[in-house]
Amino acid sequence: MNKITPQPGIMDIALYQGGQSHVAGVEHVIKLSSNENPFGPSPKAIEAVRNSAETLHRYPSTDHASLRAAVGERHGLEPARIICGVGSDEVLQFIAQAYAGPGDEVIYTEHGFSMYPIIARMAGATPVMVAERERHVDVDNILAAVNGQTRIVFVTNPGNPTSTMIPEAELVRLAEALPPTCLMVIDGAYAEFVDGFDGGASLVDRFENVIMTRTFSKVYGLGGMRVGWGYAAQSIIDVLNRVRQPFNLSLTALAAAEAAVKDVEFLSFCQAENARLRVWLSEELAKIGVPSDASCTNFILARFADQAEAEACDDYLKTKGLIVRRVAGYNLPNALRITVGDEESCRRVVAAITAFKGGAA
Ligand SMILES: *Cc1c(COP(=O)(O)O)cnc(C)c1O
């Protein structure tokens, strides 16, 4: 039969569901559904974007040397072992494309980022989901799922949408136990929200098969620019660069990210505000019977009595112009993920959930 047919697995890909940004009939909304920085991008990144306009007739750098140098300097890493992508999503895609294919298995965890099974399938590989334990990654469950076909294990640290951390000792135990033929990817999209956490860089230096990915989309407030990066052994970076298009990052994106990573003052401000407000938000909601795990990220995972209550609360918040994220698709039907906004947004969330719960608002 002559019929145009996609590669096996492609039609099994469920389209990624982004955070909602509009509510019908509500004009001014506060979007707390995509873990964006409530303070926007660094003013220096905005200026760099403006300045880039005059050279847009030029192709951008193919090796991203200037951005890699800035990232390396900021984090104390070797620039040669850094690769930049169109968001960290693209770096994750390079990893799957280069290291997994038909017949191979790619492990991700129960509440893990929904891009992992998507990129596994894009590469023709089979995603394998492993159970977590009480919203924490369980290393023993991962190891029990590893077999001769396993090529990649994706973990997020701290986790999204759980907001919890994998303890350092557990990460080391996982890295030590994985066969050398299996890559371990530590997705550090929220690493900047954990004081003193290196995102897994020291593990990359210790284990040949460990890769760290990072992003400019969260604390740096550049989700719209699409810039991320990865750090790994030189041999792995050399492989990943072969599946990277030479001009994957625009000149504007490169300029914005470089300015952002150098603006330590703005970064510190965002980190401090987030650390303060996530505790406040979590404590205020706990007082009215909506608990959450101590957050290591820029969001909290608020738990309700059951799925019906979580959905009713989400509907109520929408009527107040507050958009949060349902996470039933992440096997967390009783919960809502709420990005930590600025102080006014946090106060509005608490007031609205208090009113929903029947208290005085
Ligand atoms: C937001 C997020 C990313 C970042 O994706 P980008 O492509 O860099 O915007 C990666 N992993 C997780 C778990 C995230 O939540």
Image (tube, rainbow, N blue to C red):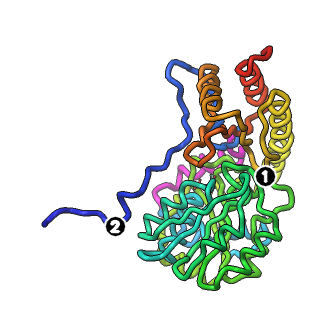
If the image is split into quadrants, where does the C terminus sit? top right
Label 1: how many residues lie within 10 Å, few (<14), some (14-19) or many (20+)? Answer: many
Identify the mark nearer the N-term, 1 or 2. 2
Q: Which one is nearer the viewer's eye here, 314 or 42?
A: 314
Where 33 sits versus 162, above or below?
above
Q: Nearer the viewer, residue 287 or 71?
A: 287
Residue shown at 82% from the left, 62% from the top: 197
Residue 9 position, x and y percent, is: 38, 64
Q: Secondary structure at mark 1?
A: helix
Residue on which disc 2 sits: 8
Q: Is residue 349 above or below residue 195?
A: above
Estimate the x, y position of residue 275 in percent, counting from the top left.
84, 44
Q: Nearer the viewer, residue 177 or 44?
A: 177
Which segment did they paint magenta? Answer: 40-58
What's under tag 1, amino acid-wise? Phe
Q: Does residue 58 lie above or below 289 as drawn?
A: below
Whether the magenta-drawn stretch holds residue 52 is answered as yes
Which residue of the protein is positioned furthest toward the left in this rendering?
1
Residue matched to label 1: 193
Ligand 1 is found in which quarter of the picture? bottom right
Say if the magenta span includes residue 185.
Answer: no
Q: CA distance from mark 1 to mark 2?
A: 39 Å
Describe residue 284's horizontal placement relative to residue 298 as left or right: right
Residue 39 in view here: no
Q: What is the three-letter code of the residue carrying label 2?
A: Pro
Q: Residues within 10 Å of mark 2 (few under 14, many from 20)?
A: few
Judged by depth in the image, the label closer to the viewer, 1 or 2, is 2
Is residue 34 at all visible to an observer of this figure?
Answer: yes
Q: Secondary structure at mark 2?
A: loop
- x, y percent for residue 326: 60, 38
Magenta segment, prevailing SS (helix, strand or loop): helix
